[in-house]
């Protein structure tokens, strides 16, 4: 329980929480983007 208290109250804990949330969001974004590129028709290039 002390670890959660430190995570939400200390500066280093809040930085860590921000990094964790950013990495989860980036993973979701990249997963969705790669899946859309996999389903795109051949010949369509790029990340448009």
Image: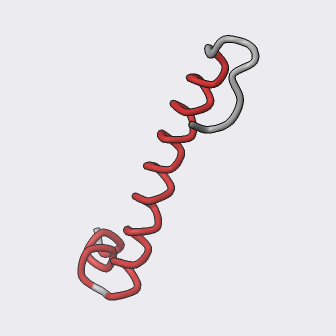
The colour scheme of the drawn protein is: secondary structure
Residue 21 percent coordinates (x, y): 40, 58
Image quarter of the C terminus: top right
Residue closer to the observer: 44 or 10: 44
Residue closer to the observer: 39 or 30: 39
Residue 29 percent coordinates (x, y): 49, 41
Residue closer to the observer: 39 or 43: 43
Determine whether 26 is above or below 5 in the image.
above
Q: Residue furthest bottom?
A: 11
Q: Residue at x 45, y 61 (%)?
A: 20
Residue 24 percent coordinates (x, y): 46, 50
Determine whether 3 is above or below 39 in the image.
below
Q: Residue at x 75, y 18 (%)?
A: 43
Determine whether 22 is above or below 13 in the image.
above
Q: Quadrant of residue 14?
A: bottom left
Image quarter of the N terminus: bottom left
Q: Residue at x 26, y 74 (%)?
A: 8
Determine whether 34 is above or below 22 in the image.
above
Q: Residue at x 62, y 16 (%)?
A: 40
Residue 35 percent coordinates (x, y): 59, 23
Q: Quadrant of residue 38?
A: top right
């Amino acid at each position: 329980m002390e670890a959660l208290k430190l995570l939400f109250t200390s500066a280093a804990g809040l930085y860590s929480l921000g990094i964790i949330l950013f990495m989860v969001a980036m993973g979701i974004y990249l997963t969705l983007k790669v899946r859309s590129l996999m389903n795109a028709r051949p010949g369509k290039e790029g990340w448009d």
